[in-house]
Amino acid sequence: MVVFGVVVFLLLPQGICTLAPLPQCSIKEPVPIIHKYYQSGDLIIAGIISLIYIFSSTISFGKHPAQELSDDHMVLTQNYQHILALAFAVKEINADPRILRNVTLGFHIYNSHFSASWTYQASIELLCRRAKFIPNYKCDVENTPVAFIGGPNSNVCLHMATILCMYKMPQLIYGSSPVMNKETQAVFFHRMFPNGAFQYKGILHLLLHFSWTWIGVVSQDDDNTESFIENILPLLSQGGICFDFIEKFPKLTSSSGFGDMVGEGFKTLNVAISSTTHVVLMHGEIQTMAVLRVMPQVAEMENMPWRTMAKIWVMTAQMDFTSFPFQRNWDIDLLHGALSLSIHSKEVLLFRKFLQNRIPASEEEDGFIREFWEESFDCSFPSSAAHKMDRKRCSGNERLEMLPVSVFEMGMTAHSYSIYNAVNAIVHSLHASYLSQFKYKGMPRGGRWKLQQWQTFLRVKVGKIDPPTLQDKKDVVTSLDNVFTIHEDLIIWPKQFNQSQPLSMCNDHCHPGYSRTKKEGEPFCCYDCFPCPERKISNQKDMDDCFQCPGDEYPNIAQDTCLPKTITFLSHKEALGISLDTFALSLSCITAFVLGIFMKNKDTPIVRANNRGLTYTLLIALLLCFLSALLFIGQPEVVTCLLRQILFSIIFSMAVSCVLAKTTIVVLAFMATKPGSRIRKWVGKQLAISIVLSCTLIQATICSVWLATTPPFPDLDIHSMPKEIVLECNEGSAIMFNCVLGFMCLLAIVSFMVALLARKLPDSFNEAKFITFSMLIFCMVWLSFVPTYLSTKGKYMVAVEIFSILSSSFGLLSCIFSPKCYVILLRPDLNSKEQLSIRKN
């Protein structure tokens, strides 16, 4: 454990005889000052401690406090332990022969009454001999304190410094440290309180740990407030904390201003209670809690429903849970679940026993014990003021351990532990001085910060902030990141939060799947939440913008994470692939069956009359077209990507060119029957072969150029489908692909036009009508293919192309060959020469 290191420079003042030319030092007994505690010794440690609060507003420095003391005073019973901690530390040191050998340590303790005049009075009296109160006049240094311990509030310390720094007296402060305006004062000022930066960073860690980003701030109205505001508010803002309100809480005043103080405090409480934040950071001093506890009573009188609007009070280490005696029976619902940072304290051996043996009869020099005893046990001694005579009689044998912790604690508190350490620091410095060892020796360095939580004034340690190492001290922000620990299971939250951790934010978090947008005119932690756009996600809370998933991933439904895309292609194993396979194979079988019928009946008139060679070629081409569709199904490979479009385009061009040749021959044959026609010499097999070869060769040439320049290749399409990666054949060049399709469409259009001219030729078996209809189907199929193909994504693009191939090929097969198959199979009587010669009227 690392504890405080305190260096006390002892600068003993010289005798000063000024102001009045007094011939000798008076030995007349002074008017006794009440509320003081003396113990004689060779060396004196002085203490100015706040225990009894005076409500009189007429106290002046020119009058002795005893003359002005009235019954309008109250005892902050918890602070009596501060006095006892000093007395116990002195007793423990005097019992140790290893320290200050042959020297007795004593102490003088005065009460400041939380008043400037009383503090000034006590400071001067402590500098004078016990026999006479004569400022600025000393004949020797007997009973002159070697150091002063003061506190617990900053005003007491500041008023002490006003007097004591002029006499170069070292002062150790155990509570709130005042803001020193003079550097000369700071030289004699030694704080037992740790570096405030560690406390502020600890508060930030605490707020961030519970995600409390929307808080209120209440600080006591004094000089220290400005320092607190200047230091902690920028730190909290940088850490992501913003503030609903920043208010000041009135400080404890005299009776004349008590009503105004309550009124101002009620306004502040009203702001806090009506705020939407559930967490209020409060900076004050040891007596602030007593004022805060008055506010709920005022709220009850004003019918404010403060009980239903619970707050978590986060308090700084300067505060303590003190109260006035009349508040002992008040409920503390307002404070339930409060979190307080506190200076580390530990159980000091024999201190509890020291407290247990404390009774008024054995402590004649203790001018505080009777007031404390009466207020703590709600009793009175016979010599007490008249207004206390209605109480029960104090026996003097009551035990401190019988008191509730809201009145007095038996365990050494943080402030008392600081006093205990301050006494030891002074004594070790004196011991070193007497041994002529002026070299600084590292003293035990004090205290770890402890987080404390209260329930009905029960202290429960729920965490800690360890001090940083020497190498980390330069960077407070970094050094505290790894030393903050908290045990949430030990915290009991207020019942208004259903015993669960409360939230304190300007608005709820923007959950993953949403992005935040700052609200205009509101603090930076107030924002609106909007869902992520399509195909974007946010995977953390309160993200400023959504982002796209990588190409191989896609957003889930909640749009808060990316899922891996599945790899897909038109497979032979899926339903669609199986259906297309079945369709293609069925049509192939039908085509083969038709070819077999025509080959079996090759010598019949109907087969011979329609150019048997072109018929066989057309049927074979259609058969290959149906089979080529199978190349489009299955995982794309290099070979299949190269062959499927090329083979289909060449084969289908051959089929269409056969249709064109058949239609052309029919037209030319009819024209050749006219007398004197020269076209007869063109009619024959050579013409048909020429048409088929030339058209097929042109398409083959286009395909060769395509393969030589930008051939198709296997590719991954990661953008078309939101949840799938499509394995596909990239056509390489869209221009060449369109050229191939365009040439087939050109052949179909020419065939359609030629067939349209021949549709009325007088021939019982004229194919022109059927070819016209088949070309019409072909054109309709491929014209509808283009927009359908472009509007379809993924593997369904392949399915559209396969369907177009099968449909257009089936159109040719059914329109051209079904009438002939009907005659061959079902009407053989029409398959004769005589029937071929019959002409329709």
Image (cartoon, grey):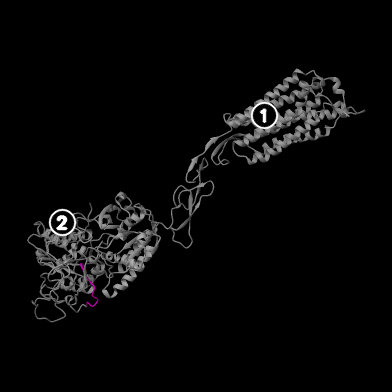
Residue 420 relative to residue 209: left or right: left
Depth order, front residue of 697/132: 132
State the separation of the CA atoms marked 2 and 1: 102 Å
Three-letter amino acid code of the residue under disc 2 = Arg
Q: Which corner quadrant of the image does residue 107 belong to? A: bottom left
Q: Is residue 638 above or below residue 18?
A: above
> Quick one: quadrant of the C terminus?
top right
Q: Are marks 2 and 1 in contact (CB under 8 Å)?
A: no
Task: Point out residue 391 in the picture as x, y percentages from the top left corner.
Answer: 17, 68
Q: Which residue is mark 2?
A: 352
Q: Magenta: predominant secondary structure element? A: loop
- Residue 85 is left or right of residue 490, and the answer is left
- Work out whether mark 2 precedes mark 1 in sequence or the reverse, and give the earlier one: 2
Q: Quadrant of residue 126?
A: bottom left
Hey, what amino acid is under mark 1? Answer: Leu
Q: Does residue 143 appear anywhere in the picture?
A: yes
- Provide the secondary structure element on which disc 1 rests: helix
Task: Identify the secondary structure beneath mark 2.
Answer: helix
Q: Along the line of sight, which residue is nearer the eye, 87 or 430?
A: 87
In this orientation, does residue 636 appear? no
Estimate how packed mark 2 is, as few (under 14), some (14 to 19) or many (20 or more) residues with alpha carbons within 10 Å. Answer: some
Q: Which residues are magenta?
A: 50-59
Residue found at the far left of this picture: 102
Q: Is residue 480 left or right of residue 712?
A: left
| On screen, residue 787 above or below 95 | above
Which residue corresponds to the image point at 82% horizontal and 21% vertical from the top-left?
A: 830
Q: Which residue is mark 1?
A: 647
Q: Position of residue 203 (x, y in %)?
A: 33, 57
